[in-house]
Amino acid sequence: MLQQDTSRPSWESEEVPTDWKLASIIPVYQKGMGEDPGNYRPVSLTSVPGEIMEKIILGGTDRHLKNNTTIRHTGSQSKSPV
């Protein structure tokens, strides 16, 4: 599996390759006059291996916390007086 081959050195060394941490910021046009910089929003494009590794780690952490009932999220308990 390609992902397994590229992530193994990072996983074993516990270091993330520098290029996985980098992102390209691209301005994406929203609306209005194209000359106005305020009519653009920034979008960051990150590396695919970095995104996949992030999801794997996040999923494992989330499962661990749920299985060990370390964190319980009950949502907001406050009620608006209105």
Image (cartoon, rainbow, N blue to C red):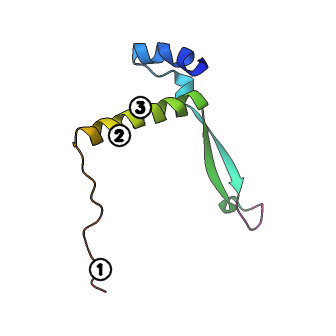
| Left or right of residue 9: residue 78 | left
Image quarter where the N terminus lies is: top right
Q: How far apart are the alpha carbons under marks 1 and 3?
A: 37 Å
Image quarter where the C terminus lies is: bottom left
Disc 2: which residue = 62
Place residue 69 in its image quadrant: top left
Which residue type carries mark 3?
Answer: Ile
Look at 69% across and 62% down and name the residue there: 39
Q: Is mark 3 on a helix, strand or loop?
A: helix
| Left or right of residue 43: residue 9 | left
User: Mark 2 and mark 3 in contact (Cβ < 8 Å)?
Assistant: no
Which residue type carries mark 1?
Answer: Ser
Look at 29% across and 65% down and name the residue there: 76
Q: Is mark 1 on a helix, strand or loop?
A: loop
Check if residue 33 falls in the magenta segment: yes
Check if residue 38 falls in the magenta segment: no
